[in-house]
Amino acid sequence: MFGIWCFAHEEKGNSVKIRILSISVTALILTCCTRSSSAQTLTPDLKAVPDGKGWKGSIGATKLIEKDGAAAIEFNKPGQNVVWLDGFEFSAGTIEFDAKGKSAPPQSSFVGVAFRAVDLATHDAVYFRPFNFRAADPEKKSHAVQYVSEPQWSWQKLRKEKPGQFEKPIEPAPDGDAWFHAKVVVEKRQVKVFVNGATEPSLVVNELSDRPGGSVGLWCNGYGVIANLKIMPNK
């Protein structure tokens, strides 16, 4: 970690105290974030995404809308789209967000978050298939939430070589056309995914990436909306 150093002085009576202040470059870069009452919770500025201020990636695939008065980012383009925080580093912690996709037609809505992100091709992600949340076919329903580690471990490769391990159903199944809340816990090289306040995770996997860190971002293929993104890095 490198930073910017400056000096400040305090005068009290006839004495002068000199204090050295350190401001990390990462903290300066994160002008797109504000801190909540918890010192460890970051709330990235989603309003800045379409302008690319503090964000990188598939900026042209994003549109700013609202969810209950809060900023939300809508994706509505085919293909894998990822936008991530510029200059941010995340190694472990918790990512929370609200998301909404659609239940029809099939294969039209994939939405989630990326982490350990380097670029469009290199990142880990947890994403949801809302069209499978309440699918009548048990096999399709078992593909509701997915972990991938691109580019080495795509969903196709995982389904072929490690079937049933990195994608699971969600119980109780959310409405595929409604907002749902997700919490992704990344800790000790393990990823746990909780949906709508559940005490038990819908998905638990060991990370497949050997990257020690990377940025955090929004991930979507087709239609999806994300709001209320919060990042709580571990100390």
Image (cartoon, helix red, strand yellow):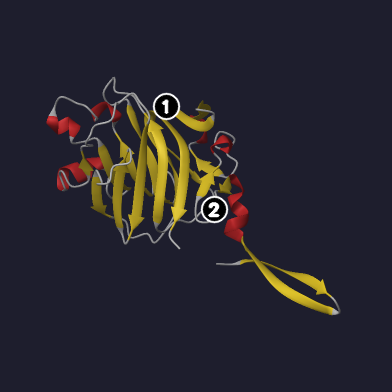
Q: In this view, does 9 lie to the left or right of 114?
A: right
**Residue type at mark 1?**
Lys
**Residue at the location (44% across, 29% down)?**
75
Q: Return the mark for residue 152.
A: none
Q: How crowded is mark 2: few (under 14 residues within 10 Å), some or many (20 or more)?
A: some
The residue indicated by pointer 2 is 87
Dividing the picture into quadrants, the one containing residue 4 is bottom right
**Residue at the location (18% across, 47% down)?**
165
Q: Can residue 80 be seen in this view?
A: no
Residue 231 percent coordinates (x, y):
46, 49
**Residue at the location (52% across, 35% down)?**
59
Residue 207 percent coordinates (x, y):
29, 55
Cβ atoms under marks 2 and 1 closer than 8 Å:
no
**Residue at the location (58% across, 51% down)?**
30
**Residue type at mark 2?**
Gly
Dividing the picture into quadrants, the one containing residue 24 is bottom right
Residue 117 to residue 144: above or below: below
Q: Is residue 136 left or right of residue 19?
A: left
Precedes in sequence: disc 2 or disc 1: 1
Residue 51 percent coordinates (x, y):
59, 35
Q: How crowded is mark 1: few (under 14 residues within 10 Å), some or many (20 or more)?
A: some
Q: Is residue 100 left or right of residue 39?
A: left
Q: Is residue 45 visible?
A: yes
Which of 57/32 is in front? 32
| Residue projecting furthest to the right | 14
Q: Return the mark for residue 77.
A: 1
For mark 1, give the secondary structure.
Answer: strand
